Image (tube, rainbow, N blue to C red):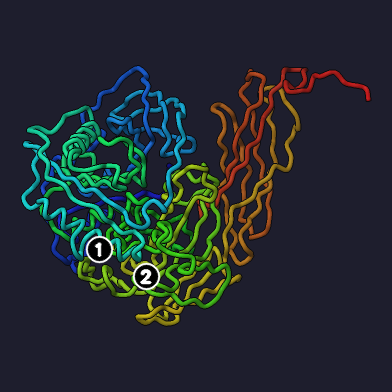
Amino acid sequence: MKNLPAILISIVGIVALVGIMVLLLPRQQLPEKAAVGQGIAVANPVAEVNADDSNPTDATLEKTYEGTITLLAIDDFNNTNNSRTAVMLDTGKEWIELKNPDLKTIKPGSKVRLTGIMNNGKIDVSDYELLQSRHVPGPEFHLGDYPVLVIMGEYGNLPFDTGFTADFVNRLIFGDMPSAVDYYDEVSYQKTHLTGEFHGIYYLGDSAPEGETCWHRESAMKQALMDAAADDVDYQQYKGFVFVLPVTYGCGLSYSLLGPFESNTPDGVVLHSEVTLNVYGNPDLNYWGFVATHELGHSLGTPHSNYANCGQAYFGDDLFQCQNWEYGNVYSTMGLGYWLHFTANFKNQLAWLDDENMITAESGGLFMLSPLETQGGIKQLLVPWGFASDFPFTNLDGESNGGEFGNYSFEYRQPSGYDLDEYWPLPPEFKKYGVFVTFRSMFLNPPADWMAWAWTTDNLVGTHQPDGSYWPQKDAVLSAGEGYHDNQIGMSLNVLSTDPEGALVEIVRDPSLCRRDFPIIRLVSKFPAGAVVSGIPVTYLFSLRNADSPECLASGYDISVEGLTGWQYILSPTTNVEPGHEMQFSVTTSSPAQSSVGNYSFNVSVKNQNHFRYDTHISSSYIIRLPGGASPFFDKRPMVAR
């Protein structure tokens, strides 16, 4: 995953409705008027233990491990240091987290043989062998009837808190509104219908298992629960498993396989999704309904719905300067919204939208958006943003799959069904209904047999000038007469009218708006042109072109060199460059005396001073020869007469 320049903020809590929001977002002073609703008080000291600190056993010798690569979405709402997407090796007996997986080549779903050292409870992978490449199914897996098995078990020394009964959990998943079954019927437009049954509570023994890491214990507990239920169920009959256990040693409050994978059951290998709910505290239906629908969303293949926090700037001025607030979309169950609808981005990803429900505006025009909560009409209006090599909101390394392509996504919401205030009463200053703007990025050219459909990103965009308040999301909704613009691509959205039946919006592609682009650099010449004796200075002359559109202001550029230790690099001063214009600059370098014969490379990087994500680099060579001799790379083949 990329090292993002922005700080990834992912803080979630469970003290009250407001307490959850306080911990999910950066820790700042919460306005009193935001304190609304009744939540659940919890006491869960064991959940504060970080999984990486739980009795690690470090080995000094490499070992070999075999299993299937799986992706795990971990949500610890009490200790968000544990909230992350982890890559796991499923050995058939347990899950082991991988420290440095290369998902460019080790694809989820593949069976592999890994070599590595167990370090702090994780495998530090040094080498691997692909044993079998597995095709991971796409959204078709969860469409139609989706049979889910819910099994619940406890230990004598680890019982459920009072109120977490079989009736409560059965009601939570399979009951009447609100329930997970009813929720997914509505938000999927009846395209994903949860069926299935509940079994338990099973008594799993007097003492919960122990192990070297939390994942050893979690794996043992789930295996014990599956074995206990084996006589009552046929695991081959289900597409989804939901394990309900008392909260334990800090692997995460709840976690899910990100999409379907194959794993062992008492009835053989089964292709299935998987959710583990580690429950505790007060069995509040609204809160645990949020947790259940959130985790089931992960198991279908969706990551989090986040928020793009741009501080005092507009997202449309320079999206690369914005921060990614994990869980920050308070209007979606895949963010922080209790029972609220998925965004149009994720409904698209999960194939809940048909072609007639989506439209792409390559140019301007008028469009009627129908409410996201109802069936029929246009639910998603997409405007292409373009390609960039380093989106700040990517989940995985975009460069490994041809980069990422971005789209604006516009949707319209009205008070209906699960989007009513009944389960998620936001403070009154939060506008909940109107036109929402989100930003979607997705892999441009994913490899074959790879679960790219599960890696669409989803960021709510602030549409009003930020006022520096704690809750920038409160101004994310556009009402009639309001609009949004992006100077980078020359696009404006105007909301012309709204009513319960739909929103009439206008897209304007304005060529007069500034559109920024990556600077272009090329090597013009170098002197001396060929190989030199070590220590001789060589001057490289480069040209720099500002590729922004003519409507942009001039930009200054920072120039830097990444080279070898002990070498000298001298840069000429630079000035501002007008859009469409070029300037030249030089780099003079020399090797240390007595350096060995060879070809030595260095990188020259150019970065926009005010919009630092617009950068590029070029590599150049310094070739050292022997004194009085030719270049070490001179072609010494004999000449042939022709």
At label 1, the amino acid type is Asp
Front label number (1 vs 2): 1
Tell which residue pokes out farthest to the right in this image.
642
Task: In the rendered view, tell whether residue 64 sits above or below residue 194.
Answer: above
Crowd band around label 1 with a 10 angstrom C-alpha radius: few (<14), some (14–19), many (20+): some
Q: Position of residue 411 (x, y in %)?
A: 41, 69
Circle on res. 372? 2
Q: Position of residue 321 (x, y in %)?
A: 45, 55
Q: Position of residue 210 (x, y in %)?
A: 16, 29
Task: In the rendered view, tell whether residue 559 sits above or below residue 143.
Answer: above
Crowd band around label 2 with a 10 angstrom C-alpha radius: few (<14), some (14–19), many (20+): many
Q: Position of residue 48 (x, y in %)?
A: 18, 41
Q: Which residue is mark 1?
A: 182
- Is residue 292 at least partly visible in the picture? yes
Whole-number angstrom distance, CA of label 1 to CA of label 2: 17 Å
At label 2, the amino acid type is Leu
Q: Are marks 1 and 2 in contact (CB under 8 Å)?
A: no
Q: Residue at x 63, y 18 (%)?
A: 594
Q: For this view, does 419 lie left or right of residue 556?
A: left
Q: Residue at x 77, y 18 (%)?
A: 629
Q: Residue at x 52, y 78 (%)?
A: 366
Q: Judge by depth and name the residue closer to the eye, 594 or 421.
A: 421
Q: Secondary structure at mark 2?
A: loop
Q: For this view, does 75 lie left or right of residue 370?
A: left
Q: Is the C terminus in the top left, top right, bottom left or bottom right quadrant?
A: top right
